[in-house]
Image (tube, rainbow, N blue to C red):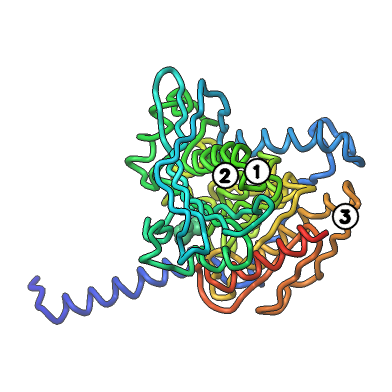
Amino acid sequence: MKINALSLLIFCFFLIGNISVIAQDEFNYDESKVPAYSLPDPFVSQSGKIITNANTWEFVRRPEIITLFEDHVYGQVPKDFDAITFELAGEDKSAMGGQAHLKEVDITVTKNEKQITIRLILFLPNGQTTPSPVFLLINHRNHENIDPTRQVKMDFWPAEKLIERGYAAAAFHVQDVSNDNKDTFKEDILETLYPEQLQMANGMRGLGAWAWGAMRVMDYFERDPQVDASKAGVVGHSRGGKASLWTGAQDTRWAITLSNDSGCGGAAISRRKFGETVKRINTNFPYWFTDNFDKYNDNEDALPIDQHMLISSIAPRAVYVASAVEDEWADPKGEFLSLKIGTRVYRDIFNLPVDLPAQLPAINQPTHLPYVGHHIREGKHNLTAYDWEQFMDFADLLYAR
Ligand code: GCU
């Protein structure tokens, strides 16, 4: 049979048409097709004990939940090392036209005579008589987003605006701890400091490494007298938002944990399978999660936790979930539900006045309660000046209490 150019062209169109049908069918964006599901109960321990007070929450249930996330989702985050040092690698006391004091700090962690260094970029507002509250961004995008020279200024990290409002602006790049790349993610802390984790089915991977990095920055905040480490917020967008939630869930030193458009493996309920699914994220980004997470591909109902429990484990410290209406891939409704259900622990265990609306709030109408914040803004998947303004408004309220 002879294949002429026209029939080849028709065949190609047929193929492309079918491929796109398959791709669209694979992910659900239709609320009426969200499967029925039941969520694991944060208030019942693994031995069946009903958790009713802060003591059993702190000492029984919360540690259990953290271990479940380690074993099934993110992997362990080792805290042991031999030494940590902080070295001022660069300084400008009149950065931003005199408004800020820039410190570039090399945080070096040593274990078994091997070292890695995280470069922290920190702008402190000048003219303050007391230590400054701070926001730390876990930056996974280009380095130019956190340009210490400020020749490049991006809304992704609006350091000038933070300074204007009396906040210190801090950021580090994830590449210093674990490159955001499936072939090279091991090269930094995993191979250097914690190679045993790579052999473990519940060992640390990329997101855990980034959370570890944020914790080392907190170690620095605690030692800098210009920073008020008791008023520190950890912020991440998307994959960085997954890492910030995992940071705040484990490390109780953060006053606020903020996630922006964090989606699957972040704030969104996995069992909803709306937009990105566990299988899809494990296929495209296997190096973010621990190996055991693969068991839940097309099998979300078997997860012993869901993401609402990540929110619960931050209690009673403040938590903020931000979404964007056009970011359906990240399932804004699932992100909100997780916050709504997860923060019942704030109310029922810690007696905090947390009562989120029953339905996903309207666009650009932030809900700022004491200890819990939420907004869904117009627009696409991104971290914007609007998001940061809401984060600062929320922190203003919290710290004024
Ligand atoms: C991909 C990925 C998401 C992630 C996002 C991001 O879209 O599927 O899970 O949040 O990248 O980090 O921007």
Residue under pointer 1: 303
Q: Position of residue 18 (x, y in %)?
A: 36, 71
Q: Position of residue 258 (x, y in %)?
A: 64, 57
Q: Secondary structure at mark 2?
A: helix
Judge depth for marks 3 and 1 and give the one in front: 3
Q: Residue at x 45, y 25 (%)?
A: 110
Kindly tell me whether residue 295 is visible in this rendering: no
Could you say which is closer to the camera, residue 261 or residue 341? 261
Judge depth for marks 3 and 2 and give the one in front: 3
Disc 3 + disc 1, Cβ < 8 Å: no
The amino acid type, in three-letter code, at marker 3 is Leu
Residue under pointer 2: 296
Q: Earlier in the sequence, mark 3 or mark 1?
A: 1
Would you place residue 152 above or below residue 266 in this image?
Answer: below
Q: Is residue 307 left or right of residue 140?
A: right
Q: Earlier in the sequence, mark 3 or mark 2?
A: 2
Numbered circles on residues, count: 3
Would you place residue 393 above or below residue 38 in this image?
Answer: below
Disc 2 + disc 1, Cβ < 8 Å: yes
Q: Earlier in the sequence, mark 2 or mark 1?
A: 2
Residue under pointer 3: 352
Q: Position of residue 108 (x, y in %)?
A: 45, 32
The amino acid type, in three-letter code, at marker 2 is Tyr
Residue count near mark 3 (Cα–Cα under 10 Å), binned few <14, some 14–19, many ≥20? some
How far apart marks 3 and 2 lie (CA) works out to 34 Å
